[in-house]
Amino acid sequence: MKNKFGPLLFVLTVSFTNNILAQTSSLSQTLSNQQMIQSGRILFTRHCSGCHGNAADGQGPASQMLNPKPRNLVTGSFKFRSTPTGTLPTHEDLIRTIDQGIVGSSMPSFRLLSHSEKLSLAMFIKSLRADWKESEGSSISIPDPPKDIFGTKSTLLASAFHGRKLFIEACQTCHGDKGLGDGPSVDGMVDSENRSIRPANLTKKIIKSGPSAKDVFKAISTGLDGTPMPSFADTYSEAQRWNLVAYVFYLRGIGSGTYSESADTLTDPSKQKKNKETKTSTSGDSSWN
């Protein structure tokens, strides 16, 4: 006699088996995550607690001697992110900071750690905040630097001419006339922890947000949370933000001697005579990428 319940039993068995496998996989992933967090905790104690403190609150034994102060990883803001202002950084953002360090601060590069160790450290940092999953942002689009701006010296200077107007409008009060970080609003400037803070000196080759054009574009687009540096993503178009980046590179060139304020005066490109393009030397210079 044919068993009319056979197909139903088969479906129920397969469904039950898949459910068990899914629960097992989820449990395995949870255990794996917990193991990584525990590994990250050990690495944090070994490499980071001297500055950030055992509680990761930025109150390590070395913190009193440091300026800028170490980040409070539990309640503090994160400056360097690829995510919109007011959101937490992505896993990749944390790993990037661990890997690169922060120039001009006491945060060194931990490039010698293995990738799995950096992953574990990032997992531990994220575990410090119960709201991380809900507050983590999605990376904004960071396009490659436009070749029609960064391809030659003359195209960069033409873009920087337009960027200077935006700089005077939005940046000069903090960063100063020549980008030295000495604008009229500097006195009394504080961060979200009410600590004294100064704007970046944009004539330096490398600033804290990173050396490349994409790094500067990212900082302009996302802002630096916890500081007076806002996001300009809703204020200026993508093209305008690239003009600002070009002007920052012009200021950097003035600082390094690549450009001369007298010889490379920024003039309206529409009024310039057409001259033969001079290729900008970029060999070995990652800041154009």
Image (cartoon, grey):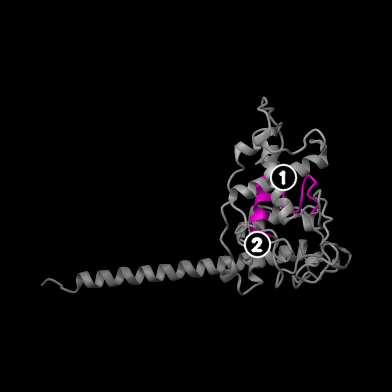
Q: In this view, does 25 lie to the left or right of 119?
A: left
> Which residue is most to the top?
276
Position of the N terminus, as image quadrant, is: bottom left
Q: Position of residue 119 (x, y in %)?
A: 63, 58
Rendered image quadrant of residue 43: bottom right
Foreground: disc 2 or disc 1: 1
In front here: 70 or 115? 70
Q: Which of 32 and 225 is in front in this view?
A: 225
The secondary element bearing badge 2 is classed as helix
Taking the image as drawn, is residue 144 in sight? yes
Name the residue that disc number 1 marks. 247
| Dot 1: element | helix
Name the foreground residue: 18 vs 262: 262
- Residue bearing mark 2: 122
Q: Where is residue 247 in the image (x, y as percent from the top left)?
A: 72, 45
- How far across and down, in percent of the image, does residue 80 sit? 69, 58
Residue 201 falls within the magenta-colored stretch: yes
Residue 139: say if magenta. no
Please state if 259 lies on the left or on the right of 86 as rendered.
Answer: right
Please state if 194 lies on the left or on the right of 135 as rendered: right
